[in-house]
Structures are given as structure tokens and as C-alpha cells.
Image: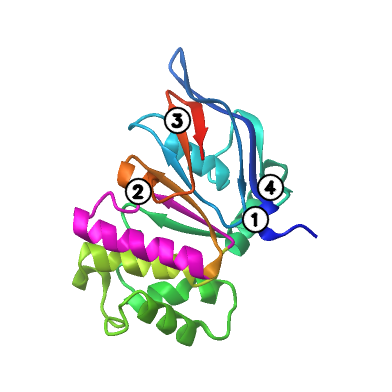
Amino acid sequence: MSNNTEQVIIEATDLGKQVSTGDIELTILAGVSFTVRTGEAVAIAGVSGSGKSTLLALLAGLDTPSTGTVHIDGHDLYALDEDGRAALRGRMLGFVFQSFHLLPAMTALENVMLPLELAGAEDARPAAQAMLSRVGLGDRLHHYPKQLSGGEQQRVAIARAFVTRPKLLFADEPTGDLDPATGMQVVDLLFGLNRESGTTLLLVTHDEALTQRCSRVLRLSAGRLQNDQQ
């Protein structure tokens, strides 16, 4: 049995994405291939419009590629139907977005409990409370998103992403809506939890300070992978 650091958890092969606008065929991604090993923290970097978020959506099975394949933990993502991909996401993936995506009518605690309840977990409340305490919000359990600062909302989103103990965490510009100091706190938290849980982290960012915290950087330019920096 190989150890965790040798196991490939993501394998993208010749990924491409084209969209048609009128008579024009627009190439968003072309010929993107790489692997990610279990426990790595990998940045997907590039200027705005380089295809970063599209690539993340394809890796998560939220969008369909025009060409190529994605294997997640050995599963051929696009050989599965939509329900199969959703089940795989629910079982393996956590997400953190730039704009938090918290449900406004739910408290911080209820937002973090939600993925556990959807998965049928019996310990949703204590597990969510423990995770909110871990991200420094143990005294904000019953606050609604509008009563929290941007940094606090992002910490709730991170707690929600990690509470199911996903094998893979996808973060799309997680500090994009935050001031630099708050953003740094959120990044420290993200990488701290990543180390504690052994989760594999895939991070879309144009923030060079953030890429330097990752073990590798995949750089996209005009939809193509430029290099894979160790």
C-alpha cells in the first residue's frame, strides 16, 4: 500500500472548454493536464479571465468539459451522471467561495450544520459548534450572516466546508472580498485546518502572497497551463 503522499486524488487529462457566442467559438481552456496528490496545497493562479474558475468548476463536476477527462480519487467524473457527480461532491468535496454563499435566513450554527444534516449525520449540532469554536466564532453561533463582518462570514463558510471532513477542499478567491489583514487571518485558518485534517487544498487566486503558501502553483494564461511550479 502506498502512503498518502503518493496517492493521486485529482487527475485532469487534456481538459478543454469551448463556448459559442453567436458565430464565434470561444476557447476558455485548452489541453490542460495535471495531477494533484493527497494532502497537497495547490494554487491555480493567473490573471482575471485566464480560465481559473472554469477549471475549478470542471474539476468539481459543476460544469461539463468540451474535451478531456477528470478523475477524482479514481472515479471518472464525467462517466457519472449528474446525480452521481452530486453524490461524489457531497461525499468528498468542500467549497469556499469569494462571496461566502451563506444562507441569510440561517444562523452561523445552522449554516454549518446544514451539510451534516443533508448527509444524515446524527451529531450535526455538536460537530458544527466545535468547528465554529475552532474558527474563533464560538460566541457567534446564533448570529445571522448580516450581523457578522465579512471576515466572520468567511470563517463561517470555512467551518461549513471543513465540518464534513472532506478529502478535497476547493477555494475560489477566498480572500477576494476581504481587506488584507482579515484576508491573512482567513488564509492562516485555511492552511491550519488543511494541515490538521489532511485535506487536499486546491486554491484559485491571483494573490501572489497566497500562492507562496502553497506547495505548488499551476499557472494559467489564456486558458493554457504555462508551468507547474514545485
Ranked by sequence position, the earlier of labels 2 and 3 is 2
Residue 45: percent from left, percent from top: 40, 37
User: Of the residues tagged 3 and 4, which is closer to the observer?
Assistant: 3
Report how many numbered discs are placed on residues in the image.
Answer: 4
Q: Identify the secondary structure beneath mark 3.
A: strand
Q: Quickly name the residue at label 2.
A: 210
Q: Which residues are magenta?
A: 167-196
Please state which amino acid type lies under the numbered disc 2.
Answer: Leu
Please state which amino acid type lies under the numbered disc 4.
Answer: Asp
Distance from Cα at disc 2 to Cα at disc 4: 35 Å
Query: Circles 3 and 1: CB distance less than 8 Å?
Result: no
Q: Quickly name the residue at label 1.
A: 5
When the figure is inspected, residue 41 is found, relative to residue 70, above or below; the finding is: below
Q: Is residue 92 left or right of residue 99?
A: right
Q: Identify the secondary structure beneath mark 4.
A: loop
User: Of the residues tagged 2 and 3, which is closer to the observer?
Assistant: 2
User: Of the residues tagged 3 and 1, which is closer to the observer?
Assistant: 1
Please state which amino acid type lies under the numbered disc 1.
Answer: Thr
Ranked by sequence position, the earlier of labels 3 and 1 is 1
Q: Quickly name the residue at label 3.
A: 220
Q: Residue at x 50, y 29 (%)?
A: 227
Distance from Cα at disc 4 to Cα at disc 1: 30 Å
Ranked by sequence position, the earlier of labels 1 and 2 is 1
Q: Quickly name the residue at label 4.
A: 81
Would residue 170 be counted in the magenta stretch? yes
Where residue 61 is drawn, which disc sits there?
A: none
